[in-house]
Image: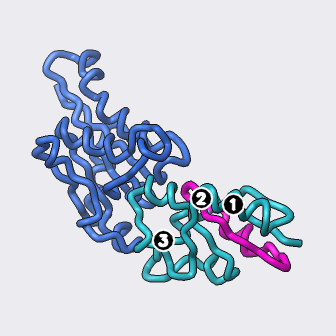
Chain colours: A cyan, B blue
Amino acid sequence: MKLGVFVNDYKSTVDTVERLKADKLGLIFVQNGVYHATLKVNGKPCPLLDKTANLYALAEDLATRGLTDADVDKRVKVVTYSDVVDLIFNDYEQLAWL
Amino acid sequence: MADIKCAFVIQRPPYKSETSTLGFTHAISYQVVEMLLEDGQNVIPTVCMVGEGVLNLIKDQKAMENYGVTSIESHGKNSLLVDLDILVCKEDLDGFGIPEDRLLDAEDMGADKKLQIVPYSEIQKAMESANHLLFF
């Protein structure tokens, strides 16, 4: 299974995502999910960033919240809406919205 | 006659819902509420930003450009412009690693008020002294 997961909220989805297993797992941080890619709670990055190497954060949602590329963890690729469409059609067979 | 103290506690992050926006707009509307009070009575509002609510205060939000909506930053600045006290939990800012210079101000709008970064104990005092406690 190739599973792309839209993480669109902060905190409440962490447990669910940590239990997911897939041959290829992508985490696409959108809306308030972008805080997973930017905030270090008590100096520690979000544990979701250790879940997979396929990490993406939507540039528009970062900018809306006053966040910049410099705030994003180096493991996360900042992408545009167009890039997300490419991910949906080219990289993942199934998609989830959490 | 005693004044009425209201504490508007904003604890939710921005944009996923209208919750934090409503917190600011309710606090700003206190001036209208005063019409319903007895003579000489005043409403004294305080906005308290705690937990993920502090994320609403990061400056340079591009909500109009990307979502076509007024940014929550604007609501925060308007709150300062009408002289609302906005208390921001220092522990939560530190926990998220957000420095003070990343936070909004309303100097460009001519506001005298600034965000007040305080320990949670100060916010606790504000909540304890309030006649009405409203969570957003």
| Residue numbers of the magenta segment | A12-32
Total residue callouts: 3
- Most foreground residue, A3 or B98: A3
Identify the chain of the residue marked 2, using the numbered disc in the image. A
Identify the chain of the residue marked 1, using the numbered disc in the image. A
Q: Residue at x 20, y 31 (%)?
A: B3
Q: Residue at x 16, y 16 (%)?
A: B39
Q: Are marks 2 and 3 on the same chain?
A: yes
Q: Are marks 1 and 2 on the same chain?
A: yes
Label 3 Cα crowd, 10 Å radius (few <14 / some 14-19 / many 20+): many
Q: Is residue A20 magenta?
A: yes
Q: Residue at x 57, y 60 (%)?
A: A80
Pointer 3 with pointer 1, Cβ within 8 A: no
- Most foreground residue, A20 or A28: A28
Q: Quadrant of the N terminus of chain A?
A: bottom right
SS for dot 3: helix
Residue A35 relative to residue B22: left or right? right
- Which residue in the structure is indicated by mark 1? A6
**Mark earlier in primary sequence (3, 1):** 1
